[in-house]
Amino acid sequence: MSTTVTKAQIDARLIMPFVNSTRNVLQTMLGLATTIDRPRIKSVPAPEYDYSAIIGFSGQIVGVVVVSFRRETAIKMVNAFAGDEVEPDSSDFSDAIGELANMIAGAAKKDLGGVASISVPTVILGKGHIVARPSDIPCMVIPCKTEAGEFAVEISIKQA
Amino acid sequence: MQYDDHIKQLALFVWDAVLHLPLDEEETSPPVGQRTLSACVHITGAWNGALALTCGDGMAAESAAIMFDLERAGVSISDMQDALGELANMIGGNVKALLPEHCHLSLPMVVEGIDYSFRVPGSRLVSRIPMRSGEHRVTVSLLESDAVAA
């Protein structure tokens, strides 16, 4: 599949709600301003960052959204979220990563319209992991920068 | 409810019916430092949790070759992910039948890597069954959660 075809299949109306929800959640919950870099298409499955939270969409919107954090970024964000130092190996840490992703996906879901459900997050911890995406849905990566570091939101969703 | 025996039997049934391969209980956990794939299906409704299936890429490749009638050399990583997701979906579907009515199964989520762990926030491990299919190690885990999908 050529990149041109893939670009044509991505609906910007499905992307903007995640840009807005990411900015809003990080500003509201962590007090962090987020700079959104130029989104790119991920044509080949490859690792993004060290920790990922995966949220599945079902209903009128189907697919998967992955929020992936550099380790240092995740530690700073979780500590800010919890208001205390949280051990990265603890369940509280993965709970916090999952909850941030859940808030981003949940807020975006409201703006997407239609009837959709989001899954409980699955959190993956470990450098070099690759999350499988639906093969029939293109993946758009939104690179994000904050004072706490870099992370990315990977969006592979479509209207059912 | 004790899930170990049920999960063991269901995994054995799926392996036999779909892959025509044996599956035996194994005492030890899979070794670290090898490339593995994990497929996870969430169960929501009257009971909330997740079923996860983890194995090495060799088992995933063999499963894909059998399920999709492919030459082993022609199996892609995407085939492996699809095969493992489908196996997790089948075991999860059978587990769902043991749970209270009105439970739903999510689409499978599949991850691969060498040194990773996966967690379902707010859940606790209620069953973990290490098994072996020929030379390959396979682990089936069931997690119960208090969290509810939105």
Image: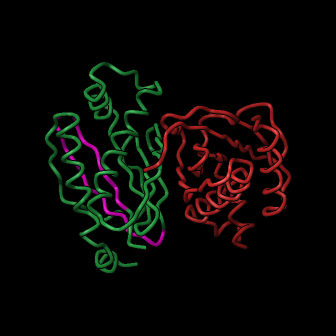
Chain colours: A green, B red
Quadrant for residue A84, please give it: top left
Say left or right for A141 vs A56: left
Residue in front for this viewpoint, B46 or A139? B46
Q: Residue furthest top?
A: A84
Residue at the (47%, 27%) spot, across then down: A91
Seen in the picture, residue A50 relative to A13 is either above or below; the reply is above
One can see residue A20 in this view: yes
- Left or right placement of residue B3 versus residue A120 in this view: right
**Residue B117 higher or lower than B110, as above or below:** above
Number of numbered markers: 0
Image point 36% across, 44% down: which residue? A49
Q: Is residue B116 visible in the rendered structure shown here?
A: no
The residue lying at 35 percent from left, 68 percent from top is A114
Residues A43 and A99: in front is A99
**Closer to the camera in the image, B4 or A76:** B4
- Percent coordinates x, y for residue B55 in the rendering: 67, 47
Residue A77 image offset from top left, x and y in percent: 27, 32
Above/below status of B114 relative to B11: above
Q: Quadrant of the N terminus of chain A?
A: bottom left
Q: Which residues are magenta?
A: A135-155
Q: Percent position (x, y) of residue A116?
A: 41, 62
Q: Quadrant of the C terminus of chain A?
A: bottom left
Residue A137 painted magenta: yes
